[in-house]
């Protein structure tokens, strides 16, 4: 049975290994499955929940699209577009926000984390962001959404909104209730300098992350200098407790190799980190540096990227626009 898949990535610029292993690598696998109908969105409307530099935002939109394509997502097989080019997303978000109770949004932990202590200064957009996400998903009759731990709560909200709309307007199954696609054998990618923190583009040290635009030499150097500990690699996963840097590097190796942590530990258990790092650097650089080269090549062809996004937006508008008209009819407009 075919799956209709929707997912998006914010155009924040400087995408890194955590973005690739956490989302984009999975997108490529979904794109390559002929049974899937895939839509991958550069969610630029989500990006402006915090202040953006105008010119940088344009560049970041292109860079995210370039990363999709360079990683192996074919615009001829899957729809790739940026959210702001399809008006239905904003229109759908408003209509869904009128049926979603405040209490549901108040439970969203990600707003509390992002807004921090002074939530009164956070934008309204940041607060209602999950409803826009629901609109993104529901407008395409999406059956499955690839999600990480940080988005599971938002997908649950999407499911709740779909069910409430269907019940409120007595239109059973009109808005499809999507299922999560949770990647197996995936470790959350942490900083190369501190295994207790997520790998992030905002970290002041470039050595804390592998950027998807890094060269082969940069990748090798960063893995060589990545923090570890003085103990040998264990044979059992439970013996990684309390060793966040070791667990992170072994998790990266497992994810990039498409194998379980158990298999990785059986491969390297008892060995020292210098040997392991050499193999990790080799497998990472062989995978990431060709993507890096292709991203740079695509960014030099802005006309091609803009055309690909525009064509994707045309296809997306055709689907989402029809759904919006049906929603309007059901509501009574």
Image: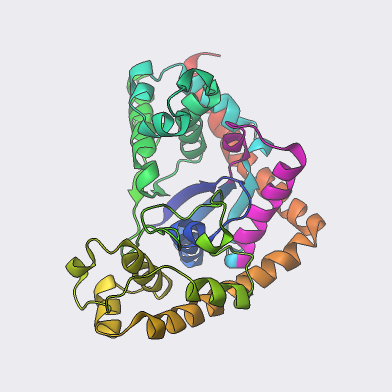
What residue is drawn where x is 53% and y is 47%? 8
Q: Nearer the viewer, residue 305 or 32?
A: 305
Q: Is residue 309 left or right of residue 200?
A: right
Q: Is residue 166 above or below residue 114?
A: above
Q: Give residue 207's position: percent from left, percent from top.
A: 54, 63
Q: In this view, does 14 lie to the left or right of 124?
A: right
Q: Is residue 144 visible?
A: yes
Q: Is residue 101 visible?
A: no
What residue is drawn where x is 45% and y is 50%? 4
Q: Which of 105 and 121 is in front in this view?
A: 121
Q: In this view, does 178 lie above or below 272?
A: above
Q: Is residue 298 above or below residue 113?
A: below
Q: In this view, does 43 lie above or below 273?
A: above
Q: Which of 160 and 124 is in front in this view?
A: 124
**Outermost residue to the front:** 230
The magenta stretch is 42-70
- Locate the C terminus by quadrant: top right
- Within the magenta stretch, is there residue 265? no
Task: Give the quadrant of residue 190.
Answer: bottom left
Q: Give residue 218's position: percent from left, percent from top.
A: 60, 73
Magenta: main secondary structure equals helix
What residue is drawn where x is 73% and y is 49%? 59
Q: Nearer the viewer, residue 91 or 290?
A: 290
What residue is drawn where x is 44% and y is 57%? 22
Q: Give residue 250's position: percent from left, percent from top.
A: 35, 71
- Within the magenta stretch, is there residue 58? yes
Q: Give residue 99's position: percent from left, percent from top.
A: 41, 18
Q: Is residue 269 left or right of residue 105?
A: left
């Amino acid at each position: 049975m075919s799956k209709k898949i929707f997912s998006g990535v914010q155009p924040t610029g400087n995408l890194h290994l955590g973005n690739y292993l956490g989302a984009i690598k999975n997108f490529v696998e979904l794109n390559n499955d002929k049974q899937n109908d895939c839509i991958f969105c550069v969610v630029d409307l989500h990006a402006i929940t915090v202040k953006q530099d105008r010119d940088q935002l344009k560049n970041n939109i292109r860079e995210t699209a370039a990363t999709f394509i360079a990683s192996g997502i074919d615009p001829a097989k899957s729809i790739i577009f940026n959210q702001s080019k399809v008006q239905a997303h904003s229109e759908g978000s408003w209509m869904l926000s009128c049926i979603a109770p405040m209490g549901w949004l108040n439970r969203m932990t990600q707003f509390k984390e992002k807004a921090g202590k002074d939530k009164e200064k956070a934008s309204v957009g940041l607060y209602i962001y999950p409803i826009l996400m629901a609109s993104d998903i529901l407008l395409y009759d999406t059956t499955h959404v690839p999600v990480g731990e940080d988005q599971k709560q938002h997908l649950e909200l999407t499911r709740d909104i779909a069910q409430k709309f269907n019940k409120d307007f007595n239109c059973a199954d009109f808005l499809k209730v999507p299922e999560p696609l949770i990647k197996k054998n995936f470790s959350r990618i942490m900083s190369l300098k501190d295994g207790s923190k997520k790998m992030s583009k905002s970290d002041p040290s470039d050595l804390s992350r592998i950027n998807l635009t890094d060269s082969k030499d940069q990748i090798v150097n960063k893995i060589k200098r990545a923090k570890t500990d003085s103990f040998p690699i264990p044979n059992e996963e439970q013996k990684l407790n309390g060793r966040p840097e070791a667990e992170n590097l072994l998790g990266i190796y497992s994810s990039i190799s498409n194998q379980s942590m158990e298999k990785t530990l059986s491969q390297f258990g008892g060995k020292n980190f210098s040997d392991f790092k050499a193999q990790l650097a080799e497998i990472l650089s062989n995978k990431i540096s060709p993507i890096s080269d292709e991203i740079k090549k695509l960014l030099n062809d802005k006309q091609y990227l803009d055309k690909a996004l525009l064509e994707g937006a045309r296809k997306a508008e055709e689907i989402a626009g029809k759904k919006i008209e049906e929603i309007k009819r059901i509501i009574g407009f």
